[in-house]
Image (cartoon, coloured by chain):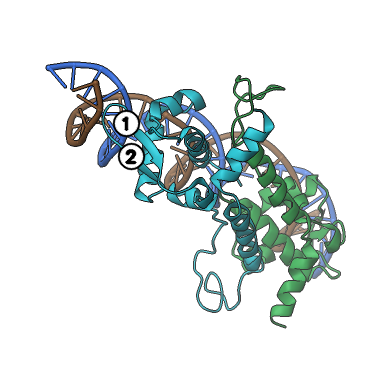
Chain colours: A green, B cyan, C brown, D blue
Amino acid sequence: MKLTSKGRYAVMALADLARFNNVNPVSLRDISLRQGISLDYLEQIFSKLRKKEIVQSVRGTQGGYILNKKAKEIKLTNIFDAVDEKVKTVQCKKESKKGCNGKATKCLTHNLWDELENHIYNFFDEKSLEDLVKENSERRI
Amino acid sequence: MKLTSKGRYAVMALADLARFNNVNPVSLRDISLRQGISLDYLEQIFSKLRKKEIVQSVRGTQGGYILNKKAKEIKLTNIFDAVDEKVKTVQCKKESKKGCNGKATKCLTHNLWDELENHIYNFFDEKSLEDLVKENSERRI
DNA sequence: AAGATACTTGACTATTTTAGTCAGGTTTAT
DNA sequence: ATAAACCTGACTAAAATAGTCAAGTATCTT
């Protein structure tokens, strides 16, 4: 099981944005430099974030992105969802009402993955961008 | 983020083994048929499980595998560990004592992944093979 | 008006991982 | 002997990942 860079980058970039998001929009270029993420890749990621209305774009010179909601209201689940980072446990290929893979019963581990999915989902759903920024500013002023 | 089939197969196969593990060893062929997993792939998986002393092999006709410990003592973490299914959150490429990626400070999301890792680890470490088998026998006799 | 900055989009690609397959063994009960 | 079943290592097609590249469009500053 692994988390991909895309999800990590999205969270990093938004955490960066949340920190510097006072009045002016933050350019991807700045985020790219501060966080060490390829500018082109960031653009892909922010395109998705914008479509899901997590950020707003400001074009032109001095443009950039701003958060579309309060940092407190942006949960990590929202972010992962936006960039297609899925908590996908392996699925049984065919699941009918009664069982998996055409068998009469659910496969032995079916419930396990369901449980895990919820477990991880809850973890991310309790964390907001604000929490992340707070943790970091506490750690070192 | 995803869980791979290898981990799922390992758990499924061991759950199967735990259920039919009365006196005689269980052949991979049987598990393969019951669980719908390729025999060749199962062999790869069981080779690893054997090396980590989760199962014991019995060679020859009527051979197969038996659990090497009580089902209660086999946690899912042990299984995932054995088949190299890692709960790996994306790592910062270079982590020195002070920071990530050569920077002076830890990256903004560093702690987050650490927390998540623990969260998932705990989930799997609380579940034993016995729990899995019990859940299933309760569900339908 | 010109130029620079920065967002926008879509196509492309090298690398890695995954989920196996395949081939050739060895061991042991009957 | 022989068949069942374990054992091992090498190989590979397909998918996912982590980007790059190219060609824009919008808008601010001068």
- Residue A2: which numbered mark, if any? none
Q: Chain of mark 1?
A: B
- Residue A60 sits in which quadrant? bottom right
Q: Chain of mark 2?
A: B
Circle 2 — which element?
strand
Residue at mark 2: B57
- Between A99 and A84, the one lying in front of the other is A99
Quarter of the image for the C terminus of chain B: give it: top right
Badge 1 vs badge 2, beta-carbon distance below 8 Å: yes
- Give left or right: position of D6 versus A37: left
Circle 1 — which element?
loop
Q: Does C9 appear above or below A64? A: above
The residue depicted at 81 percent of the width and 64 percent of the height is: A25
Amino acid under label 1?
A: Gly
Residue at mark 1: B63
List the single residue furthest toward the bottom. Answer: A141
Q: Residues within 10 Å of mark 2 (few under 14, many from 20)?
A: some
Of callouts 1 and 2, which one flags the residue occurring earlier in the amino acid sequence? 2
Amino acid under label 2?
A: Ser
- Give left or right: position of B18 versus A123: left
Q: CA distance from mark 1 to mark 2?
A: 7 Å
